[in-house]
Amino acid sequence: MPPEAPLFSIIIPVYNRPEEVDELLDSLCGQSFRSFEVIVVEDGSERDCRQVVQLYKERLPVQYIYKQNSGPSASRNRGAQDARGDYLLFLDSDCLTPPHFLKAIYDFLQKEKAACFGGPDTAHPGFSPIQKAINYAMTSRLTTGGIRGGKHFNPYRFLPRSFNMGVQKKVFQEVKGFAEDMRFGEDIDLSLRIRAHGYPTVLIPEAWVYHKRRTKLWQFFKQIYNSGMARVYLSERHPGTLKLIHLLPSCFVLFVAASLLLALVSPFALLPLLFWALLIFMDALVNYRYPLRVALTAVAAAFLQLTAYGIGFLHAWVRRKLLRLPQKHAFVKRFYECSSSMVSICWRAPKNS
C-alpha cells in the first residue's frame, strides 16, 4: 500500500551549494508540522549535494533529482513533476526554516484556501555582518525593500518570491509552472500569471524564513542589478504592472548623479544624501538593534540596493524603449555560483526526539 500523500511538497533547486542544502534540510527536520516531503533538484552542479541528501534519508521524506544545468525555473518545474503534495512550497537553498514555518502555513490554509502565497524573510542572529546589512537593505522601510510586507501593507497585494513561495499544485499545473525562458523575475511572472487566471496571491506574515542572500556586496549588486532589468521585461509581459514604486530607485540614481555634479559647485548639495545615510545608520542601529559595524555596512548595502536596481532598470529601459534592442541580462554566467568565501552559519534546528 503506497504511503499517504503529504500536504506539502517542498522543492529546493540547488547549484553548487551542498553546505547550504545541509543546513536547510537540518532546519526542516525541526518542523512541528510533519505532513511534507522534500525534493532537492540538482541543477547540473559540479559540487553536488547527493551525499548530503543521503544523510537525511532517515530523518526526512526526501528525494534527490539530478538534471543538466538549465536554470532555477526548469529545476523547480522538474521537482513539481514528482511532487505528491496538494501544495508546492518553493524554497531557495540559502534559506533556513524556523520550527513553526509549516505550521503557520497550515493554520492559515485552514482558514483560507489560498491558491498562491508567500512569506517574508529575516536575518538569523548567526548571520555574518554583511548578510545582516543586506537583510536590512531588503526589508527596511527606508529602502524600497521594506515597502511591501509592512505593518499597513495589504497582504493581497503581495507577489510571492520563489525563495519562499507556495502554490496549489493544480493551479501551478493550470498556469504551466515557471517560465523557463526567464532567468530573472520568473517568480513575479508566475505570481502575475496566477492572478491573471483569477486566483489571488497573499502574504502570510508568520511564515517567514531566514534568508542568507549574498555574502559579498558585489554579489548583492549583481543580483539586484538583474532584478532592475527584469522589471522592465516583466512590464512588457504584463502590461499595466509597472508602478511608481518601481521607478523610485532610478530616480534615486539620477538624484545621486545630480548631487555629485552640483557638489562641484557647492558641497551643500550632498547634504540630502548625508542626511539619508544618517537615517539609515540610526534605523539599523536603533530599530534593528544591529551593532555599529553592521549599521555602517547597512548604509553601503542600502545605497547599493537602490543604485543597482535603478541602474539595471535604466539600462533595460534604454535598450528596450529607446534602442529597441533584444532583452539582455548582465552577470548571467556567475549568478548561480557559490562564492568560495561562503560563510556557513552552523545553525541547527532542534533535533526530533
Image: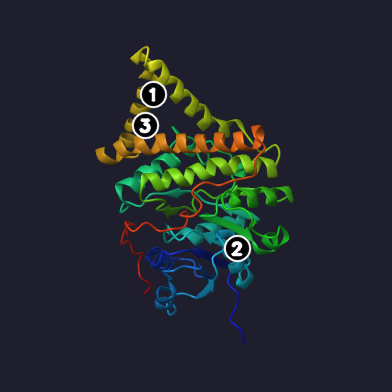
Q: Earlier in the sequence, mark 3 or mark 2?
A: 2
- Element at badge 1? helix
Read off the residue under disc 1. 273
Residue at horizontal 46 percent and vertical 67 percent from the top: 45
Residue 337, x across and y down, in percent: 43, 58
Above or below 212: residue 350: below
In front of the other: label 3 or label 2?
Answer: 2
Q: Which amino acid lies under the numbered mark 1 shown in the image of this protein?
A: Leu
- The disc at residue 74 is 2
Q: Which amino acid lies under the numbered mark 3 shown in the image of this protein?
A: Ile
Q: Is residue 340 left or right of residue 5?
A: left
Residue at horizontal 52 percent and vertical 30 percent from the top: 250
Residue at horizontal 51 percent and vertical 55 percent from the top: 163
Residue at horizontal 41 percent and vertical 16 percent from the top: 262
Read off the residue under disc 3. 280
Q: CA distance from mark 1 to mark 3?
A: 11 Å
Q: Which amino acid lies under the numbered mark 2 shown in the image of this protein?
A: Ala
Give the quarter of the image for residue 177.
Answer: bottom right
Dot 1, how many residues are within 10 Å of its Cα: few (below 14), some (14-19), or many (20+)? some
Q: Earlier in the sequence, mark 1 or mark 2?
A: 2
